[in-house]
Amino acid sequence: MSQSFAHNNGTSNMSYLRPSNGNNKSARALIAASFALTTMITASGAFLPHPSFPPPSLPSQRSSCSSASSCSSIILQAHHGQSSSLNYSHGDDVLLPPSPKRDNRTAAATTRTKPPQRLPNGGRITLVGAGPGLPDLLTLAAHRVLSDPDALVVVDRLVSKEIREVIAGEVRVARKYPGCAEQAQEEIYEWCKGGLREGRHVVRLKIGDPFVFGRGGEEVLEFRKFGVDPVVIPGVSAAFSAPLLGSIPVTHRGISNQVVMCTGYGRNNTSPDLIRYHEEQTVVFLMAVGRLRELCRNLVSKAGYPKDTPVGIVERAGCPEQRTVVGTMDTIADLAERYDVKPPSTIVVGEVVNVLLTEEDYDSFGGEEGVVVGGGGVISGVADWQSYFGQ
């Protein structure tokens, strides 16, 4: 049995344990050893580890101590848990734990709380990924939500008409065209707020995976400002599924051992940083077909890509009118113009482009064009999934 005492003799403020049994030599020896140890550590500029103490950068903010014993008293007081304060003082000496360096984003992340997922009037939001365009590639959860006849479904214009035909409720399509994306985004938010005021189930439907260059996170934060935390249903990302629907795997043993995903447009329509060339690397560009020529020119002149690097474009992946245009860094922009390639399109750069494609693919899907001279070509169509599964 032991008792805790505080001793203040005008020069130190010391908390320690005294055994109730004065003959307990082991306890006294332990206290004496603690004094010796803490004095030695303090003199060397180190501090005892303690769960409530800040990281090792703490000594840099310690003012000079008049004596080792006065410093040790401060350490012991913290070490034995006699004070819950983060500021320890003795006379004119102040020990301040360092404030963690946090920018505004970090501070906001640690202080904000999530609103409820459902408003008192029943209003709620579900943020759904539509996948690349084929209804059969919707997740079961997404299909269930889109089948709600009472839902208000706010849809991006690039979501395929085949998926829009699955929707049972009211549909509003946002016309996000180049140059008016911000205005369209504000319209989307107004539609969502209106639905929430009416106590409706608002479904925000976005192409692919909304959180891969799709403003998914931005919309979650905005919806929270409305007072509701959206439920998120992930979608199959076009970055991986679209190339494969065009017979282009993004990795292949001995050909590509790494994949990099990039967007063609940064914030405020800026160009993204270029990815340096690596022979065994695949680069997938989303939302980049509108500046394809500029992109290829910069990759060759600034990022070291050989002009004969294979490039494939999968247009409207998973839709009946899907096409795959194949060329090189030097020819693909001309081919895209010739075949009038439009969004949504996924661009794949790297040797994987030619791994699975054969001349037979071009001949069977290429229509009147077939194999294009110069190593590029166009493949049209996608497998009839209903026929394949016998439906």
Image: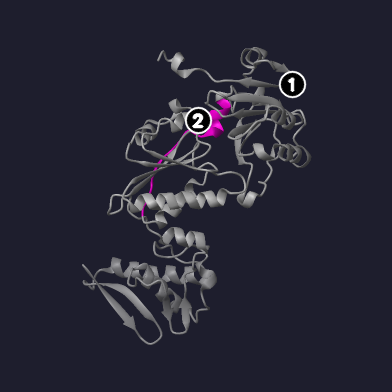
Left or right: 260 as drawn, with respect to 187: right
Amino acid type shown at disc 2: Gly
Left or right: 171 as drawn, with respect to 359: left
In front of the other: 335 or 216: 335
Quadrant where the C terminus sits is top left
> Around disc 2, counting alpha carbons within 10 Å, would you say few (fewer than 14), some (14 to 19), or many (20 or more)?
many
The colour scheme of the drawn protein is one colour
* Element carrying mark 1: loop
In front of the other: 147 or 376: 147
Left or right: 221 as drawn, with respect to 374: left
User: Number of labelled discs?
Assistant: 2
* Element carrying mark 2: loop
Compared to residue 309, the image places residue 54 above or below, namely below
Left or right: 342 as drawn, with respect to 168: right
> Around disc 1, counting alpha carbons within 10 Å, would you say few (fewer than 14), some (14 to 19), or many (20 or more)?
few
Q: Residue at x 57, y 20 (%)?
A: 381
Task: State the image coordinates of residue 223 (x, y, percent, origin top left).
Answer: 42, 52
Query: Which residue is denoted by mark 2 in the rendering?
Result: 133
- Quadrant of the rendered image containing residue 73: bottom left
Residue 135 on the magenta segment: no
- Quadrant of the rendered image containing residue 28: bottom left
Mark number, residue 375: 1
Amino acid type shown at disc 1: Gly
Which span is picked out in magenta?
228-244
Compared to residue 387, the image places residue 280 above or below, namely below
In front of the other: 62 or 18: 62
